[in-house]
Image (cartoon, grey):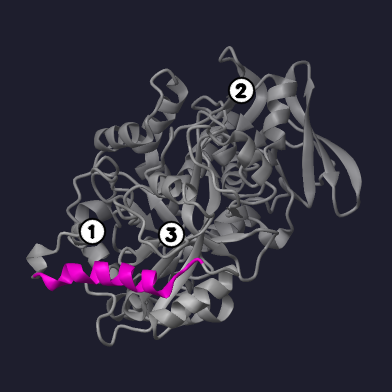
Amino acid sequence: MRPSTSPDVLVVGGGLAGLVTALEALRGGLSVAVLDRDAATRSGGLARWAFGGMALVGTPLQARMGIPDHPDLALADWRRFGALDPADPWSEAWARHYVERSRPEVHDWLLGEGLRFLPAVNWVERGRFGDGNSVPRYHVLWGTALRLVERLLAALEQAGRDGRLAWLHRHRVVALERTHGRVDGVVAVDEARGREVRLRGGAVVLAMGGLNGSLEECRRNWPADRPRPTTMLNGAHPFADGRLHRHVVESLGGVLVNPGAMWHYAAGIPHPFPHFEGHGLSLIPCKSALWLDHRGHRIGPEPLVTGFDTRWLCDRVAAQARPWTWQLLNRRIAARELAVSGAEHNPRIRDRQGLRFLLDTVFGSDRLLRQLQAESPEVLVDAKLDGLATKMNALTCGHDVDPEVLKASVAAFDAAFAAPAVGHNDPQLRLIQHARQWRPDRLRTCAPAPLQKPGAGPFVAIRLQLVTRKSLGGLRTDLGSRVLDASGAPLPGLYAVGEAAGFGGGGSHGQRSLEGTFLPGCILTARAAARSLRGGG
């Protein structure tokens, strides 16, 4: 199909949600044009670099591991942890759709596309008070989300061989157009040629991502009741800037729901090889590390430990006196627990190196620590705490960290180990011991030990910043992914999928994610849109 031909569907955005929409529409006999702001080599958007974790409900893998999960249990967790607004029926409807359909429409569909999952289910976002995931649900794609993107692109090429698929890369959509009240066209800037183009189709699907790729937009929507740091790293994408959201609201009568609902991470570092200005990497914080403020004091009295409540961690970090914190650990901890979220820094999983992955998991590995130490000035290593404090101060160009304060923070933690193991009453140790009761977490979490344990050095300090990630709010949609106006009526011809729609309904998560819900949310909303399009909705 030539780009000048009027296709059945115009898909705005070539990320995961856009790819799935296009593929399912093609398989349903429709013709499709995909307009994407990025180059062809970056098709797939952020999914190309994502780790590939997915929260799935009632899978065979859960059953094999003895996990008693079912949709009603998952929905209760979702409502409680996400604090869903009871007056928001579409967010509730999409939450229910997710927990009821993630098994057949995501898990089974992916298996049908030739993808597989690692043979373990992880337990994340448990909640500080057991109010999060009541059972493990986090499944990891073997090959990371990069393999998912590659499989989808190959499937699209196959499905579009008859000429029903057109790609328009480096095209930035700036406006939508209507004919007789139906959205059926886009105005785009061809950035390669520097000219404006107009395209017509039967319907338009918005898959342009969320709002948080623009730090200005992120700050504008920041909730007044949540602390905000003075600086943040960008873990989203600068193309996800919210401009099309505003256009739909202001020009077409759509509704933007919960723009202040955001999902960020507390442990970011600047990307050593940034894809864009301000690009941040999200580290998975080490459970066994001490989380310190800018002066080297342990943040408390409730210590910061990952895996329980990401939003709470972000609020605690954002409330600090400086826009950075420190994680203090040692080589022993780094070998087992240090991790970066994403495909780039997980080559064993990304490249499906089964034996090496198994060996690293069982015995630990210094590979990532060595890589980050070589690539990032934020990762500091020293055999002595005095030397580490000197390096920490040099990095921040100040004298905030007193070596004696750093030593006292470590000594106070290590003092907990003076008693027998049964008497370890430090709250961080209690959380670690709870996490290690689940077999996969036992493999990824060190047995508690003093930071100054002989032979466990050298010491490691990592300077961390808050890194933006997902918009939990978005354009209001129904269960067919049709964009709704303020009265709840569909805007004819207009659909929104993935993060553009707040992963369904304009905000299916509420205020928190159970984690791993974003990739499946893209797939579920995209498949719903394709069904509607095939039915002429």
Q: Which mark is residue 435?
A: 1
Q: Earlier in the sequence, mark 2 or mark 3?
A: 2
Q: CA distance from mark 3 to mark 1?
A: 24 Å
Q: Position of residue 248 (x, y in %)?
A: 70, 27
Secondary structure of the residue carrying numbered label 1? helix
Q: Within the magenta stretch, is there residue 418?
A: yes
Amino acid type, callout 3: Asp
Q: Which mark is residue 452?
A: none
Secondary structure of the residue carrying numbered label 3? loop
Magenta region, residue range: 400-419
Q: Residues within 10 Å of mark 1 (few under 14, many from 20)?
A: many
Disc 3 + disc 1, Cβ < 8 Å: no
**Residue 166 visible, this orientation:** yes
Residue at image position (70%, 48%) is 239
Residue that protrudes farthest toward the top in the picture: 487
Q: Main secondary structure of the magenta part?
A: helix
Q: Earlier in the sequence, mark 1 or mark 2?
A: 2
Q: Nearer the viewer, mark 3 or mark 1?
A: 3
Q: Is residue 354 left or right of residue 465?
A: left
Q: Position of residue 348 (x, y in %)?
A: 44, 75
Amino acid type, callout 1: Ala
Q: Is residue 397 left or right of residue 103?
A: right
Q: CA distance from mark 2 to mark 3?
A: 40 Å
Q: CA distance from mark 1 to mark 2?
A: 41 Å
Residue at image position (56%, 34%) is 501
Q: Which mark is residue 293?
A: 3
Q: Which mark is residue 255?
A: 2
